[in-house]
Image (cartoon, rainbow, N blue to C red):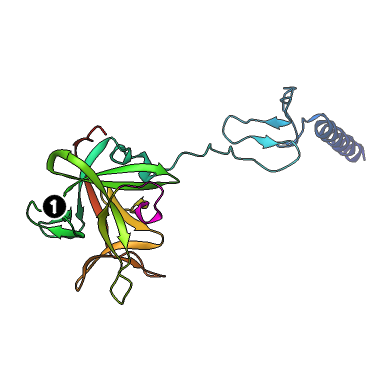
Amino acid sequence: MLLGRWLAAAGLVVLTGTAVGVYTMGPAAGDGPAGGTPAPADGTSAPADGPAVAADGPAVAATPRPTATATATADPLLSGKRRVTIVRVGAFESGLALLDGGRLAEVDDDRGRQVFVPTPVGSGQFLVKAYHGGGTGQPVCWQVRNPGDTRPLYVRGATCRADDPAQRFEITAVTDGGPREYLISNRWAYLRDSARSGLIMEELGDAPPASSFRFTDTGPAPRR
């Protein structure tokens, strides 16, 4: 009998100690600051090993600042201050030349104007000025020409006019392309190689551009 009373009293002491422990414990993790540390004024806590936690919501990861995406206009070759040669990617020992009195073509000799100065004219567009070797003489500019029959559009030389839409070209860096590899277009028509007609301007619809071009720096542009 005495043994049963002693065991009952011991059990009561254990239960009382457990209850005291429950009511004197600090708040559970995530319910508020521990150890009496005041919460930040903006209503978030910042654990050392995790992202900021909003007081009334789930964890909030820090949002990175957007970074600028490199574009073709960031290339110094497209500043109007450098002269370049242009070669179609995949061409064999030939470069672009604006033939005297004629059209833009690919040549493997020194004919025509083979020095070009892409010159920005606003809205991400460029005049492409063409010079003889070394950048000599007065420039002429690329201009899209519509022959008005079943033949495709092509590029020829013309007196430079920044307000002529047919002379305002877009030069766009090729995604995952090589160094200074660009697409060249004018009003939805892209410069491309045709086995039948040479270099032409063609609206491609949903098809990807068939030709891209590599620009090579050849020195400062002529002072004009």
Residue at image x 19%, y 74%? 196
Vertical side of 59 occupied by 171: above or below: below
Q: Nearer the viewer, residue 49 or 219?
A: 219
The x and y percentages for residue 185 are: 35, 57
Taking 180 as reference, is 164 left or right? right
Task: Report the label total.
Answer: 1
Asked if the magenta segment contains residue 56, the reply would be no
Vertical side of 73 occupied by 27: above or below: above
Of the 4 image quadrants, the one containing the N terminus is: top right
Q: Nearer the viewer, residue 214 or 100?
A: 100
Taking 35 as reference, is 170 left or right? left
Examine the image and state in which quarter residue 116 appears: top left
Region of the chain picked out in magenta, as a range: 160-168
Of the 4 image quadrants, the one containing the C terminus is: top left
Residue at image x 68%, y 30%? 45
Give, as a three-letter code, the residue at label 1: Gly
Examine the image and state in which quarter residue 187 appears: bottom left
Q: Secondary structure at mark 1?
A: loop
Q: Nearer the viewer, residue 161 or 34?
A: 161
- In the picture of the structure, the residue carrying the numbered disc 1 is 112
